[in-house]
Image (spheres, helix red, strand yellow):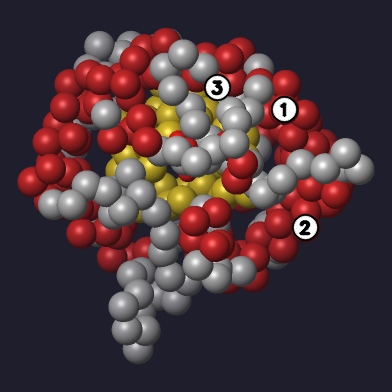
Amino acid sequence: MSKIVIANWKMNPESLKEAGKIFKDTLKEIKTIKKNIEIVICVPFPFLSIGKGLKSKKVSLGAQNIFSEAKGSFTGEVSLTMVKSLGVKYVILGHSERRKLGETNKEINRKVLATLKAKVTPILCIGESKRDRDGFYLAFLKHQLTVCLSKVPKAQIKNIIIAYEPLWAIGKNAKYVATEEEFTEVQIFIKKVISDLYDIKMASTVRIAYGGSVHPLNANNFILGGADGLLIGRDSLKPKKFGEIVKNIE
Ligand code: PGA
């Protein structure tokens, strides 16, 4: 199966002009990629138009959030139909930075269901804020998964990407970077939870990516450790570095 590299620009850059330049430069950096790598660039809503006319088979456009209702009186919200009309194929859901703003597992679950219904791929983020010796963080992850996947039909599990993003490894204030062993442990655990919720076959079809301080030098470790993909924050805004990550994986 192809590996997936997801860029999460977060609330950056500050203008459409800059966004257009980063996008163009990123496409240039990854132009030579031949192998089976899927690249998804998740940009803020006002910049989605930069993907207009995108012809690359390797690169897709993604959003960083969505509202679960299709249309109507929801001031300030954005629907799946709207972003689909701009070419969006993936949506990041439940990122820890959104959870910090108050988004709950139940809301994320509604968004997951709506995204699947719209035939857009959800990138569901889960992650604990700290690890403890007794393994309570595993129960925390299980709870996140169980609620966020509630009512997701078995046949749809293969269409979801789960991104494991431990909070302690995200952003410039990260305490330390996760090791591939730490990722692999959780990857196995996620598969076990999916297997208990559905069955073992579903557990093998779900794609599990890693995110949190991924850079050109550590990216491949996670892939060799079994990750199906990577979610990249800071280094996705630097086309050269992002290009290096993709090339290293190739
Ligand atoms: P980072 O962000 O790569 O800057 O740590 C990852 C994320 O929050 O998705």
At numbered mark 1, what does the secondary structure look like: helix, strand or loop? helix
Residue 126 placement (x, y as % from top left)? 63, 49
Which residue is most to the right? 134
Quadrant location, the N terminus: top right
Amino acid beneath label 2: His
Asked whether, in this view, residue 90 is left or right of residue 21, the answer is: right
Looking at the image, is 63 positioned above or below residue 238? Answer: below
At numbered mark 3, what does the secondary structure look like: helix, strand or loop? loop
Quadrant location, the C terminus: top left
Q: Quadrant of residue 208?
A: top right
Q: How many marks?
A: 3
Residue 55 placement (x, y as % from top left)? 19, 33
Q: Closer to the camera: disc 1 or disc 3?
A: 1
Identify residue for label 1: 182
For marks 2 and 1, give the CA distance.
Answer: 19 Å
At numbered mark 2, what does the secondary structure look like: helix, strand or loop? helix
Identify residue for label 3: 1
Q: 27 or 199: nearer the eye?
A: 27
Residue 124 placement (x, y as % from top left)? 56, 50
- Is residue 226 in view? no
Mark 2 touching mark 1, by CB under 8 A?
no
Q: Closer to the camera: disc 3 or disc 2?
A: 2
Identify residue for label 2: 143
Q: Residues within 10 Å of mark 3 (few under 14, many from 20)?
A: few
Of callouts 1 and 3, the N-terminal one: 3
Amino acid beneath label 3: Met
Q: Residues within 10 Å of mark 2 (few under 14, many from 20)?
A: some
Of callouts 2 and 1, the N-terminal one: 2
Residue 183 placement (x, y as % from top left)? 68, 29
